[in-house]
Image (tube, helix red, strand yellow):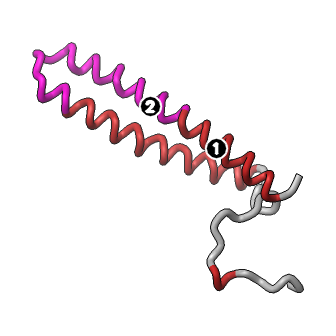
Amino acid sequence: MSKKTNSFIFMAIATVVNLLLLCFFFILGFVILNFVISAMPENVAVVQVGVVLVFVFSIGLSFFVYSKLVNFATKKFDLENKLDPLFVRKGSRRPKGE
C-alpha cells in the first residue's frame, strides 16, 4: 500500500475512534449529571447548565484523549515513516534528490 492509502486508513480509523470517545464521554457525563441532579432539588437552570457543560467537556475531553492516542500510536508503531503528511507547508518541501 502507498503512504497516501495508509494515511487515509489511519485517518478513517482515528475518526471512528474519536466519535466513539465522544459518545462515551457524553454518556458518562449524563450519568454523572443524573446523579448530581438527583441529589439536589429540581432546578431547571441547573439542568440546562449541566447539559451544556457535559456537551462542552465531552468534546474537549474526547479531543484531548484522541490527540494523546494519536501521538502514542505514532511513536509506538513508527507511523511517521509509513504515513504521508496530511498538511505540508509550502516552503518546507524538499527537492526529490534529497
Q: Residue at x 62, y 77 (%)?
A: 89
What main secondary structure does the magenta stretch of the protein show?
Answer: helix
Q: Secondary structure at mark 1?
A: helix
Q: Going by the image, does 18 lie left or right of 40?
A: right
Count the numbered circles shown: 2
Query: Magenta part of the protein: which range?
Result: 20-48
Which residue is label 2 attached to?
25
Would you say residue 37 sits in the magenta stretch? yes
Q: In the image, residue 76 lies at what x, y percent?
A: 74, 50
Q: Is residue 6 above or below residue 25?
A: below
Q: Residue at x 24, y 21 (%)?
A: 36
Q: Going by the image, does 98 lie left or right of 93?
A: right
Q: In the image, residue 78 lies at what x, y percent?
A: 78, 56
Q: In the image, residue 28 lies at what x, y percent?
A: 41, 25
Q: Residue at x 52, y 34 (%)?
A: 21
Which residue is label 1 attached to?
14
Distance of label 2 from label 1 (alpha carbons): 16 Å
Graded by Cα atoms within 10 Å as few (under 14), some (14 to 19) or many (20 or more), the crowding at tag 2 reads many
Res 83 quadrant in image: bottom right
Q: Quadrant of the C terminus?
A: bottom right
Graded by Cα atoms within 10 Å as few (under 14), some (14 to 19) or many (20 or more), the crowding at tag 1 reads some
Label 1 is placed on what type of residue?
Ala
Mark 2 or 1: in front is 1
Q: Residue at x 89, y 52 (%)?
A: 1
Q: Going by the image, does 58 lie left or right of 68?
A: left
